[in-house]
Image: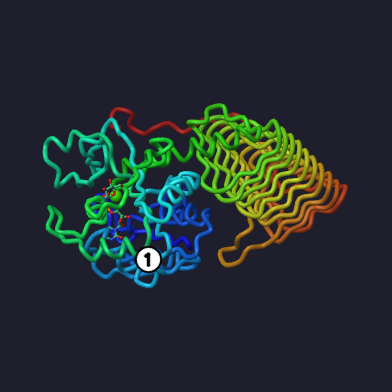
């Protein structure tokens, strides 16, 4: 008996008020639907069927690569209609697990448990008791406490609205049963839709046992209908990720002020201060320290390096024992050697900075190869762009570039060269020599500043 998973993802999500279809709304930078597909994949089912419709082209171009069977629902006639579109060819004795594309935080263990509960013959659904059940379908039980139906909020009587046990949207039953119930659905309800949830009453009336499992945590069942829900789900997911990383030895000064939108691998004794945003694939070695308010995107930072507050590091590789920031900006293709320093208001792009080299203050260094133990003074600029093309600056080992120097690329500075402060370097600066370009200073003795004419009529 195989397992088929049906994911409902055709709705527009009117309540999101967004140009983006709901199932593409990002949670930790990944579309909601991707999270649900990943939970389904964890069960290793025979097949995953995704019912899509609204924003179909957008959904296909964002997620068309997923290994699922795409089922197009041209008109969104309701969740029951959507499931019916998907299960036509599913073998009679297969189990069908229905997931909603807008309920993205379900844990694989909860899904596995639900599938086990359904077995060959029962209808299993997952319910949760909420302090505020508004917006969700309510679970109706009879005097024996057996589930006899689900009533949607819009169809519920005043009494039914007081029920706090709600439908999470998760359901599992045998394909032949489900097909039978779906064929009997009507749309005689407040929304004029074919509700999947009406299958519960039909099952109960047929004498099929309806087993309601309670979700492990309320958090898992968070549905997403509007942006407030989306922000809640984001915090739940972020907290979950933070706890996993902390169990692996990462110290987060405040797990509630940490955002991982990608993957993070960390060594031991690494500390991340508050409000870090980590995107893409980031690798931090042992004993790395990330200061408050940093953004790290697709980068690798080696052991014992300190990144001080408000630094932004993107597509870069930073060696061991370095100090970066505060307020440093490392742009793509920056490679920093061990024990180097990049200080405040320094921007780098496509450079290699040798071991022990320093760019401590207010500089722009781009398209450059910088040797070991180079000292780049305050306010040094590589003029790498002539308005049409980018050119390279090469600086040898042990060079010293005086403050406020412009290096007009293509240009090179030899090993051990010294550049006097305030120079504009346009030609090769030879090794082991002092090169400077500076207009001569002169003094006008006894000079007085001009005074305003007609001081009364200013
Ligand atoms: C649904 C349930 C409700 C439950 C809640 C949990 C029904 C009738 N109601 O309500 O009991 O408490 O979820 O979050 O099922 N969809 C389609 N095709 C359609 C209609 C919907 O694919 O024709 C998809 C949507 O894209 C969405 C999911 O089904 O991913 C649920 O639809 P939605 O309209 O959000 O249902 P709710 O009102 O939230
Ligand atoms: Ca919903």
Q: Is residue 444 at all visible to an observer of this figure?
A: no
Residue visible at 22% across and 56% down in the picture? 195
Q: Quadrant of residue 446?
A: top right
- Image coordinates of residue 213 in percent, x first then y, are 38, 41
Question: Taking 287 as reference, is 260 above or below it?
Answer: below
- Which residue is disc 1 drawn over? 58
Q: Quadrant of residue 33?
A: bottom left
Q: Nearer the viewer, residue 130 or 340?
A: 130
Looking at the image, what colour scheme do you see? rainbow
Question: Taking 363 as reference, is 412 above or below it?
Answer: below
Q: Quadrant of the C terminus?
A: top left
Residue visible at 69% across and 34% down in the picture? 288
Residue visible at 36% across and 34% down in the picture? 453
Question: Taking 217 as reference, is 68 above or below it?
Answer: below
Q: Is residue 310 at all visible to an observer of this figure?
A: yes
Count numbered badges in the picture. Answer: 1
Q: Nearer the viewer, residue 274 or 373?
A: 274
Q: Residue furthest bottom?
A: 89
Q: Residue furthest right?
A: 432
Circle 1: is it few (<14), some (14-19), or many (20+) Cα within 10 Å? some
- Image coordinates of residue 370 in percent, x first then y, are 76, 50
Q: Residue furthest front?
A: 207
Question: Taking 143 as reference, is 207 above or below it?
Answer: below
- Image coordinates of residue 379 in percent, x first then y, are 63, 41
Q: Nearer the viewer, residue 435 or 237?
A: 237
- Image coordinates of residue 239 in percent, x first then y, are 49, 35
Label 1 sits on a secondary structure element that is helix
Disc 1 C-beta below 8 A from ligand 1: no
């Amino acid at each position: 008996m195989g397992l088929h998973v049906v994911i409902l993802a055709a709705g527009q999500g009117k309540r999101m008020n967004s140009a983006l279809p709901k199932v593409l709304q990002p949670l930790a930078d990944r579309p909601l639907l991707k999270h649900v597909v990943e939970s389904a994949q964890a069960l290793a089912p025979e097949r995953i069927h995704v019912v899509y419709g609204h924003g179909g082209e957008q959904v296909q171009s964002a997620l068309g690569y997923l290994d699922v069977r795409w089922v197009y629902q041209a008109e969104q006639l309701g969740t029951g209609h959507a499931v019916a579109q998907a299960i036509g060819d599913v073998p009679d004795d297969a189990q069908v697990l229905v997931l909603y594309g807008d309920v993205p935080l379900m844990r694989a263990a909860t899904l596995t448990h639900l599938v086990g509960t359904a077995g060959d013959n029962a209808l299993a659904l997952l319910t949760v008791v909420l302090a505020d059940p508004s917006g969700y379908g309510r679970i109706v039980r009879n005097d024996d406490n057996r589930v006899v139906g689900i009533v949607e909020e819009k169809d519920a009587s005043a009494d039914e609205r007081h029920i706090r046990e709600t439908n999470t949207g998760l359901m599992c039953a045998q394909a032949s049963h489900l097909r039978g119930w779906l064929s009997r659905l009507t749309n005689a309800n407040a929304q004029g839709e074919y509700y999947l949830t009406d299958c519960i009453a039909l099952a109960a009336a047929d004498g099929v046992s309806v087993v309601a499992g309670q979700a492990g945590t309320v958090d898992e069942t968070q549905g997403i209908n509007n942006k407030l829900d989306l922000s809640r789900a984001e915090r739940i997911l972020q907290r979950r990720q933070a706890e996993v990383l902390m169990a692996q030895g990462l110290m987060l000064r405040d797990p509630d002020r940490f955002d991982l939108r990608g993957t993070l691998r960390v060594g031991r004794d690494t500390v991340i201060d508050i409000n870090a945003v980590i995107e893409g694939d980031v690798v931090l070695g042992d004993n790395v320290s990330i200061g408050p308010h940093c953004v790290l995107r697709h980068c690798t930072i080696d052991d014992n390096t300190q990144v001080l507050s408000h630094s932004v590091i993107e597509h870069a590789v930073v060696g061991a024992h370095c100090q970066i920031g505060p307020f440093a900006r490392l742009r793509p293709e920056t490679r920093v050697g061990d024990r180097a320093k990049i200080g405040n208001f320094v921007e780098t792009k496509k450079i290699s900075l040798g071991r022990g080299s320093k760019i401590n203050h207010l500089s722009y260094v781009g398209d450059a190869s910088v040797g070991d133990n180079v000292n780049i003074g305050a306010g040094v600029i590589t003029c790498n762009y002539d308005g049409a093309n980018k050119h390279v600056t090469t600086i040898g080992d042990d060079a010293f570039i005086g403050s406020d120097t412009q290096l007009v690329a293509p240009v090179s500075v030899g090993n051990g060269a010294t550049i006097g402060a305030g120079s504009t370097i346009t030609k090769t600066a030879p090794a082991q020599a002092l090169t400077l370009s500076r207009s001569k200073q002169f003094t006008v003795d006894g000079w007085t500043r001009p005074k305003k004419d007609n001081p009364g009529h200013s």
